[in-house]
Image: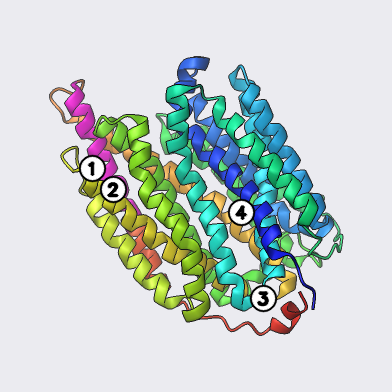
């Protein structure tokens, strides 16, 4: 039985994952600041986030293939090099274009690191310990983006936005050194044939859909923009062709057999609905707090910290509870807590107290921590080991797509709600009316999020614990 130094392996992966996710959201708070510094519009500045998501959307489908072509150490070194170079360029960036290049390099690093992290856990941990290990990944995936806006708010207030990246750099270097010392090659390199047509179709497909939805969230035209309609249609056609091609290939780039496993499908749908709930809430709440309640970016960041911190801290605990009791007793109550929190959030206004909003956000984030990792781990547990790289690639790719769609829909509902309110207002330019419009638009977004939660709750009743039949395969690790 192969013994791994799981603590050191996890430490290096988690440090790097944390810093990568941190810089992803830390920049969101800096966007207003960057618009002033670089003299760019909101739609242009938005590309710092959209470009990041788009790169992930294009790269993620290929990770299943990359995990079979390169050793664990090669992929780890490649992803960290890209992250470190991207972070250094961002720290030194003096114009928007250079910062944009840096963001793409960072996204390439993250696009390789996240699937590598999931795949390594599936290999080095036996099924009965995977929940807790996945919980630590949950801590990183939730806690890092949560601390980003608060820390960034402080850095921007007292230093400059460059320090977001200077702060990240030493941690990435430490993570790389720990990984080079302790990380072992845990996957088998089989070098399957690379099908160029599959690569092209997946790039156009996932890239087109993510780009289309991201653009829809930006402009005044929204869904009616020719660019949006064209890119979504081209993307969907390419995805249909890509899927058909994968089903007939002997060595597919993305193995569609993962969809034959019912609990994987249930887990996947619950993860995607969680992603939409989180991202639409995470983009709307800070905007409501700053524009609807006239709070500073730092105060808004601080208000969202308790819920997000609790989500991260509870993730490993939820993982352990999952190992012990299975998913049903966590996922269903979790979604009920989320639904109740969002129901109250759909009625917030500028008169709502700060304590009330903070407690609702805590409810939302604690509920999500009960859903995300248990559903994800349970789903992946059902797959045979040879489908692990494909299972994680499909899940991570569709998460990026769901994230882009969730964000775009949230922004569109918000802006159309605001426009409708101001159109009927006798004094649309008054500051109080602008704040009221923001409130009206935000309430509509939370009603959309509530719908997604209720659909997730209906699906949760179908979840059942996976008994790992291929444990013998894993026991050798």
Disc 4 versus disc 1: nearer the observer? 1
Residue tagged by mark 4? 397
Q: Quadrant of the C terminus?
A: bottom right
Magenta residues, as a range? 430-450
Q: Is residue 231 visible?
A: no
Spatial CA span between label 3 and label 2? 38 Å
346 sits to left or right of 203: left
Spatial CA span between label 4 and label 1? 36 Å
Who's the residue at 73% across and 45% down the image? 176
Residue tagged by mark 3? 126
- First of labels 1, 3 by sequence position: 3
Spatial CA span between label 1 and label 2? 6 Å
Who's the residue at 81% across and 61% down the image? 185
- First of labels 4, 1 by sequence position: 1
Give the class, few, some or many, for how many residues have Cα within 10 Å of label 1's Cα (few <14, many ≥20).
Answer: few
Counting from the top left corner in percent of width and height, residue 68 is at: 80, 60
Spatial CA span between label 2 and label 4? 31 Å
Q: Are marks 2 and 4 in contact (CB under 8 Å)?
A: no
- First of labels 3, 4 by sequence position: 3
- Look at the numbered disc 4 and give the secondary structure of its residue: helix
Residue tagged by mark 2? 358
Spatial CA span between label 1 and label 3? 44 Å
Residue tagged by mark 1? 354
């Amino acid at each position: 039985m192969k013994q791994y130094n799981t603590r050191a392996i996890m430490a290096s992966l988690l440090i790097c994952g944390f810093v990568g996710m941190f810089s992803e959201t830390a920049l969101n708070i800096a966007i207003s600041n960057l618009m002033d510094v670089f003299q760019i519009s909101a739609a242009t500045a938005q590309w710092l986030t959209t470009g990041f998501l788009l790169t992930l959307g294009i790269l993620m489908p290929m990770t299943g293939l990359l995990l079979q072509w390169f050793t664990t150490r090669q992929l780890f070194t490649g992803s960290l090099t890209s992250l470190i170079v991207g972070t250094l360029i961002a720290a030194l960036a003096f114009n928007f274009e250079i910062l944009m290049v840096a963001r793409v390099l960072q996204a390439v690093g993250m696009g390789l690191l996240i699937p590598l992290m999931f795949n390594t856990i599936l290999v080095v941990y036996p099924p009965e310990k995977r929940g807790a290990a996945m919980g630590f990944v949950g801590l990183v995936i939730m806690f890092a983006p949560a601390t980003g806006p608060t820390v960034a708010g402080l850095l921007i207030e007292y230093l400059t936005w460059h320090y977001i990246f200077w702060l990240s750099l030493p941690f990435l270097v430490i993570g790389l050194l720990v990984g080079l010392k302790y990380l072992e090659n845990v996957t088998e390199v089989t070098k399957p044939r690379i099908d160029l047509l599959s690569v092209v179709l997946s790039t156009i497909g996932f890239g087109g859909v993510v780009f289309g939805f991201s653009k829809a969230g930006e402009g005044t035209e929204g869904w009616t923009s020719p660019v949006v309609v064209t890119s979504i249609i081209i993307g969907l056609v390419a995805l249909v062709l890509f899927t058909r091609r994968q089903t007939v290939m002997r060595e597919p780039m993305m193995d569609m057999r993962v969809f034959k496993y019912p609990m994987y499908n249930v887990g996947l749908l619950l993860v995607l609905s969680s992603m939409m709930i989180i991202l639409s809430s995470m983009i709307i709440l800070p905007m409501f707090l700053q524009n609807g309640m006239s709070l500073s970016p730092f105060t808004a960041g601080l208000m969202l910290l308790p819920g997000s911190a609790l989500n991260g801290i509870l993730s490993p605990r939820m993982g352990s509870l999952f190992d012990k009791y299975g998913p049903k007793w966590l996922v269903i109550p979790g979604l009920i807590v989320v639904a109740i929190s969002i129901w109250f959030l759909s009625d917030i206004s500028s008169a709502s107290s700060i304590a009330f909003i903070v407690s609702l956000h805590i409810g939302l984030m604690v509920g999500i921590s009960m859903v995300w990792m248990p559903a994800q781990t349970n789903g992946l547990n059902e797959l045979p080991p040879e489908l692990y790289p494909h299972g994680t690639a499909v899940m991570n790719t569709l998460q990026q797509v769901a994230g882009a769609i969730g964000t775009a829909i949230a922004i569109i509902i918000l802006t159309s709600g605001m426009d409708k309110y101001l159109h009927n207002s006798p004094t649309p330019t008054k500051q109080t009316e602008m704040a009221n419009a923001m409130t009206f638009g935000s309430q509509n977004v939370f009603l959309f999020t509530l719908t997604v939660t209720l659909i997730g709750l209906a699906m949760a009743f179908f979840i059942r614990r996976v008994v790992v039949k291929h444990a013998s395969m894993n026991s050798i690790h």
